[in-house]
Image (tube, rainbow, N blue to C red):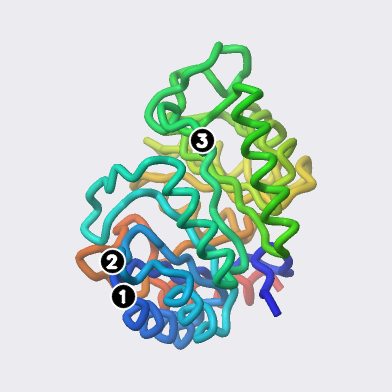
Amino acid sequence: MRKSFAKHNQALLIGVVRERTARDSIAKIQSCKTHGATAIDLHLSCMDESERTIDQLRNVVNACPLPILALNYNHSYDWKDTQTPEEERIELLMNAIHAGAAAIDLQGYSFHEPSKHNYCGAADFSFTKGNPKEIVTDQAIIDKQRKLIDIIHDMGAEVVISTHPGVFLDCQQVLDLARFLEQRQPDMIKIVTPCQNYLQLAETIKTQIVLEQEIKTPVHYHSSGKAGRLSRIVNPILGGHMIFCSDGFTPNANFEQTDLATTKIALDALNNILL
């Protein structure tokens, strides 16, 4: 039976897996579980091409006791851009669904690669100011994304729609963006914006509280950058739904993510204080 990624009572403590082979991925997943992970973030594009087959991915899924979110950000194991065409990128995500993954991360620019790096529409929305990345407002592209979401739902899996605008957004802009993304009927929404100082961090934390009150679809929001790192832990306590962690820091890790074992200790301590 396929596991659920979206239906849970508290924030998922997610172990990020960026390995080249299925066997290495299974080993990393077991390590993540040992250190407290409650879900797995599997980076498909990091795997060698021969390891990305449905059969190999099924081996990973079957060996994992936790729900897996499969994503394909076109980053290789050593963080190079794979420059994979968009249709092939989506096809690899579908391979993961066929293999039994609980959900996929569908990026906001999906089916329109130019929007990965620049905003390509008219500045008709509050959140389209400042040339944000990974945001599509073209209805034809949105309809194509919505159709894919429907297909994945028919297969019994879930969709996290994500966007990394690359520009700071205030509370109202993030709220408007979340409502806009919610119209595609994903199971979860993930928004990440950069944060340059602690005033922006305060706005980020406030925004997560408002999102929890105003948006029916589960929303996770945090900020990137040194000043925003604290939001990775604080926002999930205030209603965010995911914490992305590195299980130890290998050379190919995302150094902005918090350490999995340390984050588990910090969350347990904070939750005890709040009880």
Q: Alpha-carbon neighbours of circle 1 within 10 Å: few (<14), some, or many (≥20)?
A: many
Residue designated by label 2: 48
Residue designated by label 3: 111
Residue 21 is tagged as 1
Task: Identify the image quadrant of the C terminus.
Answer: bottom right
Of callouts 2 and 1, the N-terminal one: 1
Q: Alpha-carbon neighbours of circle 2 within 10 Å: few (<14), some, or many (≥20)?
A: some
Q: Give residue 83's position: percent from left, percent from top.
A: 29, 42
Q: Give residue 69's position: percent from left, percent from top.
A: 54, 64
Foreground residue among 231 and 91: 91
Q: Secondary structure at mark 2?
A: loop
Q: Residue at x 61, y 19 (%)?
A: 126
Compared to residue 136, the image places residue 160 above or below, namely: below
Q: Residue at x 41, y 75 (%)?
A: 262
Which picture quadrant has residue 208?
top right
Which picture quadrant has residue 51?
bottom left
